Amino acid sequence: MKLSLLNKLREVNPVILNLSNFVTVQDVANGLNALGASPIMSEEIAETDEMVKICNAVALNLGAFTQAQITHLRAMGKQANQAHKPVVLDPVAVAAITYRKQVALELLNQFQVNVIRGNAGEIAALAGFDWQAHGIDAGGGSSDLTKIAQVAAQKFHCTILLSGATDIITDGQRVTKVSNGTPLFATHVGSGDMLSSIVAAFLAVADGDDFQAAAVAALVFACIGELTASQEKKMGSGTFIMRLLDQLQFTTIEQITKIARYREVETDDKCE
Amino acid sequence: MKLSLLNKLREVNPVILNLSNFVTVQDVANGLNALGASPIMSEEIAETDEMVKICNAVALNLGAFTQAQITHLRAMGKQANQAHKPVVLDPVAVAAITYRKQVALELLNQFQVNVIRGNAGEIAALAGFDWQAHGIDAGGGSSDLTKIAQVAAQKFHCTILLSGATDIITDGQRVTKVSNGTPLFATHVGSGDMLSSIVAAFLAVADGDDFQAAAVAALVFACIGELTASQEKKMGSGTFIMRLLDQLQFTTIEQITKIARYREVETDDKCE
Amino acid sequence: MKLSLLNKLREVNPVILNLSNFVTVQDVANGLNALGASPIMSEEIAETDEMVKICNAVALNLGAFTQAQITHLRAMGKQANQAHKPVVLDPVAVAAITYRKQVALELLNQFQVNVIRGNAGEIAALAGFDWQAHGIDAGGGSSDLTKIAQVAAQKFHCTILLSGATDIITDGQRVTKVSNGTPLFATHVGSGDMLSSIVAAFLAVADGDDFQAAAVAALVFACIGELTASQEKKMGSGTFIMRLLDQLQFTTIEQITKIARYREVETDDKCE
């Protein structure tokens, strides 16, 4: 995996435009900043054109949006497509709320995204699988997660990053599975939102290789979480988020390489 | 007091729907999550029906709201009543701002709440007492706080949780007073908002016993704050919030029982 | 420098009304609270009059605003002028986004501010200088920063606090330069927003001496940041923000005096 993208990100310091979840917006901004990107947030459609112009990638988060924000999301997505800026979509809670799923599917019809980052329930909902969801969490279910991710990738012509105990990254054909991580991610609201924006930061420096960018982002974030959690025997969610920001700032490629556990799966696993 | 509700909460993992104060929304979400509930936030009225359906209780926070949000608050409260989901109202700053008091009183007329959680100034303002307020803080005053809480409970046919150095919980007749806590709660903006949403989490598992749920929530939160503060001689507000989240996650019923200081007051204290 | 204002602030506990950047609002509220002020936030124009009445100073932040918020900003600025409450403006990202610069210039035409607090790029943009900006960061450039600040102060008839490695405070004639600080401020999104609201807190207790208030605020905040950063050899942004809140609460005038590095520049440096 092309882990050198992490150093490139820190050199280039790409500007990431976020249409954010108001619940987690400060953590996302701080996470991008700590890793080495430059976050910019917007709530106003009148500045969309300019913002898309100065940014290097766009992260669209569907958490807690209003109807005004849907108009804004649409404008930002279309503008990003025109300006050839890569787009990440985070379909928060589309498994739990039908209304959100409808909005997400409409948006995915109106502009092209490069990566969708969600949990199993969210990706399954978009792909059209039946899946149980519980609040904003992933919920349980028994289908083959790799297949779900591949179907979603093929349906939306993009890369899927399905987050979980094992992260699954696929462009519909190729599949990478990342086994690093920590259960502490689940104790902190906003870990997923942070990862989605970090995917955008890697897209900004990956020269069009979306699959590579998503896989590296997943591995880097999972390893940084694992390194953070390993500092204490029994870490709480408050300590975790503080230390996670520190670790995003200081973790080197060498540290990641040392603990990385991932598998690039052969094509015979692929969706028929 | 039925402290076993804490274990039930952690088993059931109830979904708490929050119409939140944008100032403190992430802390509230993280606090609910750390304690063992599943937070969901909304800003969009079009998803209200679905959200109320999947949730187990609703927490409505009047901090920093817009007129669009008032419409949303009203819809959510009415919907919760129809679906028999318990509702907590946090009347932020109604003592300081007449406009907020008017809005709060209108809302309390339009749907039924199970618990109102506020400081002395806020509860007094809703109950119709004259009380000094200073910014978002409780302010000073000399009336009998228990009487104020009882009058408010009778006026709105609900349970009142009046937060302060001593928390007063009353359904208008019965009164419980909790003496645990820490002055550090006042150093961190959002402690009260977090408690209000935690009350909703206890309502979700209390089988209709609102008074019990509010009393247990107050005791659990006060003791967790006290345990957090006791870790260091001179703790600052930044350290406090980080450790409070950790403590919400790890504190057991046994630890709470060991330090709990509360009094269930006899009915001769009640409001005439 | 009149550092005694810090003790006055902590005695008076002024109410600071913030029209806030949603990205950093909780940090700003906690920062004000930790230092000894009483934050109040608003999103609703219907409560503007009352809020301005009860507050002691107003902080207007242009980060991530909507068109509804511009109307609100205008109303709040005009109301503050009528009620003779001091006003701070933080022109977030006006160097990067022309739309924001236009809005900021219009607002500065419609009401009088006491202090503008921004980075070099933002102050240069408002003053009409050409300056490079990168995302929300200050960007680089080679003009004389003191001159830029003085021109801006004269143009808007107010005090300018230009933040950077060296903070420059000027009323157009007098200039104070503060050399304290830490690069860690740049690692945490919202340091600048926090400083802007803290300037408002000092204006609230400075008896009309805006220049003094801005200089003291800059020195106090820079020294508190420096003291925070000095606690560890290699502090990350997560640890920094937690400890910064603690330090805002506990730092004394004596500690600041011991490390203060500032220069009150003679008038021959002034802008011709």
Image: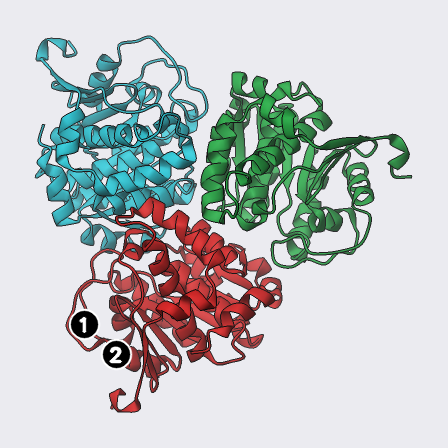
Chain colours: A red, B cyan, C green
* Residue B21 visible to the viewer: yes
State the residue at coordinates (10%, 8%).
B268
Above or below, B11 relative to B153: below
**Of C163 and A178, the residue lying toward us:** A178
- Residue drawn 50% across the image and 69% down it: A6
Dividing the picture into quarters, in which one does residue A49 lie? bottom right
Secondary structure under tag 2 reads helix
The residue carrying mark 1 is A130
Q: Point out the image quarter for the N terminus of chain A.
A: bottom left
Q: Residue at x 91, y 39 (%)?
A: C272
**Is the residue at mark 1 from the same chain as the one at mark 2?**
yes
Residue B6 lies left or right of residue C3; in this view the side is left
Can the viewer see residue A14?
A: no
Amino acid at the residue labelled 2: Thr
Chain under callout 2: A
Depth check: give the residue in front, C8 or B62.
Answer: C8
Q: Which mark is residue A146?
A: 2
